[in-house]
Amino acid sequence: MSVRKGTFKIENLHNCTSAMHGRKNTAFLAVLLIAVSLLTYSFHHSMEVETFPHQHHHHNPKHATGFALSPPPSPPPPPPPPPPPPLGGGVPLRVMFLGASVTRGDVSIGNLGFRAPLRSRLAGRGNAVNFVGTQRVGVFADNDVEARPGQRIDQLQAGGGEVEAAARVWRPNVFVVHAGANDCLQRHDPAGAGSRLRGLVMSLLRASPRAVVVLSTLLTNTVPGREACVVDVNAQVRRLASALQREGRPVVLAEMHYEQGLPDRPLPADISPDGTHPFDRGYRLMADVFYDAFLEADRRGLLSAPEPVDGVPDDGELERAGEPLVLDSDPPKKKKEKTRPALPAGNGGGGGGGGAAQPEKQTGDKEVRPKTAPEIIPKTS
C-alpha cells in the first residue's frame, strides 16, 4: 500500500511537470503573438506617417526608416490685384501742356521731363492718350507740347492769339498749365501774375469748353533772390484756383512746391545748378503730382470725352508707330491733313484791333511766330 502511494505521488509529480511545460509553451506563444502584433502595428503606423505627414506634425521628422519627411508644398501665390480702372470711365485724354522750358523738360535726359513719365502712368490706366500742341520736344513719340523757353504768362496769353488758336484746333479735354517762373526771373510784374493767369485760363476754356484745367504752382527756385517771388506767385495761383472753383469752373490745383508741407515735392537738392530746371528725379516727382491732379479731376467728375476733331486721333503714340522720332521741331509735322481755322476779328497778331480774320493756313506753309524773350538765368556767383 505504501508503495502504491509512493508510486502515485511520483506519477502525480510527473503529470504536474508536464502540465507546467505546457503552460510555458502557451505563455511563450502568447508573448510571441504580442510581439508580432506590436511589430505589425509599428509597420502600419510608419507607413501612415509617411503617407499622411500633415496629420502628424508633432512627430519627429525622422522615422525608424531613416528617411526625412519632405516639407509640404507651398500654397499657390495670390492672384495679382486687378488693374486700376481707366480715368473718366475710359475717355480719351487729349492733353495740351502750356508753359516754358520746364514744361518742355529742358535739362532732363532726352527732354523727357515730366511729360513722358506722366504719359506712361495715364496710359497704364487704360486710357488712350494724345499730347497735342504746336511743338514737339523729347525722345518719345507723342511729344507734342505748347511751350517755349523763356515764355512768360503774358506771352502765352497774347502771342497773336496763337495759343488760343491752337486750343481751338485740337480741342483738348485737359490743359496742364505750369507758367510764371519767367515772370519772376525776368522781374516782369510778378504781382500781376494771378490776374494774367486768370485771363489765360478763361481763354482756354472758351476755346475748348469740354476741358478741365490743371493749374500748377511753381516748383522751388534756387536762383538767388527769386524764391520769394516764386512763393508769392504760388500764393496768387492758389487764390485763383480757389476762386475759379467757387465760380464752378473746371479747375484742379496741382501743388508743386514743398513749402506747403506735402511730401514728395521737388526740393532744392532736386534742382539743377541753373537754379530753375529740375534733375530727372525732380521731373519724376512733378509727374507724380500732375498724375494725382488727374486723379482729382476724375474724382470730381471733370473728365469728359474730348470734342471729335477730324484728323486728331485718340492715341498719339499709335499714330506715329514706325515713324522716326522728331526730338525738337517748331512747328511739328503731326497733323498733316489739318488746316488752321481763321482767327476771329481782332485776334490777329501784332496789328491793331478790329483787323480782318486771318486766312486759313495750310500745314505746309511757313509760319511766322512771335518772338519770346530769352530765358534769363541770373548768375549765382
Image (cartoon, grey):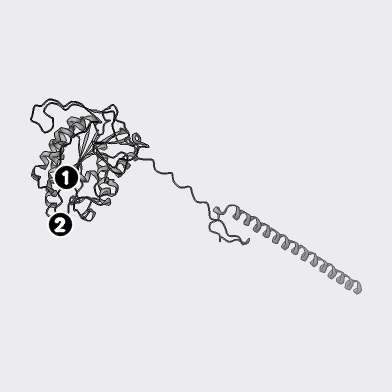
Q: Are marks 1 and 2 in contact (CB under 8 Å)?
A: no
Viewer can see residue 83: yes
**Label 1 sits on residue:** 150
Q: Earlier in the sequence, mark 1 or mark 2?
A: 1
Residue that appears at 9% across and 31% down? 351
From mark 1 to mark 2, how far is it between C-alphas?
Answer: 18 Å
In the displayed structure, would residue 183 be above or below residue 348?
below
What type is the residue that disc 2 sits on?
Answer: Thr
Relative to 346, is 7 on the left or the right? right
Q: Is residue 40 left or right of residue 115?
A: right
Residue 75, image x and y in percent? 49, 49
**Residue 242 visible within the image:** no
- In front: 323, or 274? 323
At a point 89% along the width and 72% down the height, the residue shown is 7
Q: Residue furthest front?
A: 366
Residue 309: x and y, percent? 27, 27
- The residue at which mark 2 appears reads as 380
**Residues packed near mark 2 inside 10 Å, few (<14), some (14 to 19) or many (20 plus):** few
Q: Residues within 10 Å of mark 1 (few under 14, many from 20)?
A: many
Question: Seen in the image, is 243 located left or right of residue 329?
Answer: left
Task: From the top left corner, tell me how far across and down residue 165 is, in percent.
Answer: 19, 31
